[in-house]
Image (cartoon, rainbow, N blue to C red):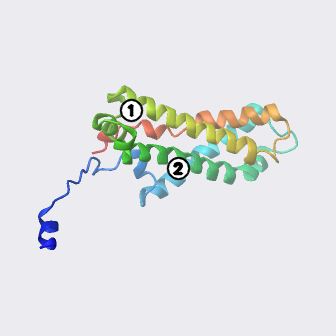
Amino acid sequence: MELTKQTKQTRQIKLYNVIFPVWLILFFPPVILVTLIGNWLIDSLVLIACYFIFKPHKEWNWLLFYKKNIVKVWLLGLLADIIGAAILFACVGFQDFLGLSNDVVNSISFDPFSNFLAFTLIMITMLISGLFILLFNYNYTFKSTIEDELARWKVAAFIAVTTLPWTFLLPTKLFY
C-alpha cells in the first residue's frame, strides 16, 4: 500500500536551461580545445604587447620574457575564467535560493543585454575574474620576473583588463 502511494506522487522538475549558455559551453569538449588555443593566442599577444609597452625587464628580450611567463599567465587566466563561470553557474543553479527570477536566469544564460540585473551580475562576475587575473599575475606570475612593483602592477593590470572573460557577454541566442 505504501508503494502505490509513492508511485502516484509526482515531482515537478523544472528544466530552465536545457541549452547551455555560451560561457559554460566554453569549458566542455570539443569546444574546450578551441577555448584553450584561443586563450593561449590572446594571452601571448597581450604578454608580448606588455613587454613593448612597459619594458618590465631591461635585461631580457621579448622572447625570453614571453617564455618565462606565458604558461603562468595562461593557466592562471583560465583559472580566473573558471572562477567567473562557476559564479554564473551558481546563479543559474541556485536561482531559487538566491531569489533570482526566471527572467534574470534566462537573461544570464541567453541574452545578458535583455535584463539589467543579469547584465549587472555578469559585469560583476567579469570584474571578479579580472581581479583574480590581476592578483594572480601580480603575486605569482611576475613576482620573480618583474622586480619593480609599479611595473608589475601595470603589466598585471593591463593583462587583467584586456583578457577579461568578455565571452560572458555573448548572447547565446545568436548561436542557436
Circle 2 crowding by C-alpha within 10 Å: few under 14, some 14–19, many from 20: some
Q: Position of residue 61 (x, y in %)?
A: 81, 44
Residue 60 in view of the camera: yes
Q: Position of residue 124 (x, y in %)?
A: 51, 32
Q: Image point 40% across, 39% down: which residue?
A: 98
Whether residue 103 sits left or right of residue 30 in the image: it is: left
Q: Is residue 145 above or below residue 158?
A: below
Residue 163 in view of the camera: no
Res 150 → quadrant: top right
- Residue at the farthest right position: 59
Mark earlier in primary sequence (2, 1): 2
- Residue at the farthest top position: 116
Q: Image point 88% across, 43% down: which residue?
A: 59
**Amino acid type assigned to the residue bearing label 2 in the image:** Ile
For mark 2, what is the residue? Answer: 82
Q: What label sits on residue 32 in the rendered view?
A: none
Quarter of the image with the N terminus is bottom left
Q: Nearer the viewer, mark 2 or mark 1?
A: 1
Q: Secondary structure at mark 1?
A: helix
Q: Position of residue 154 (x, y in %)?
A: 73, 32
Q: Image point 73% across, 47% down: which residue?
A: 141
For mark 1, what is the residue? Answer: 118
Residue 55 versus residue 16: which sits nearer the camera?
Answer: 16
- Residue at the farthest front position: 1
Q: Position of residue 167 (x, y in %)?
A: 45, 40
**Amino acid type assigned to the residue bearing label 1 in the image:** Ala
Residue 168 versus residue 158: which sits nearer the camera?
Answer: 168
Residue 166 versus residue 116: which sits nearer the camera?
Answer: 116
Circle 1 crowding by C-alpha within 10 Å: few under 14, some 14–19, many from 20: many
Compute the Cα span from label 2 to label 1. 19 Å
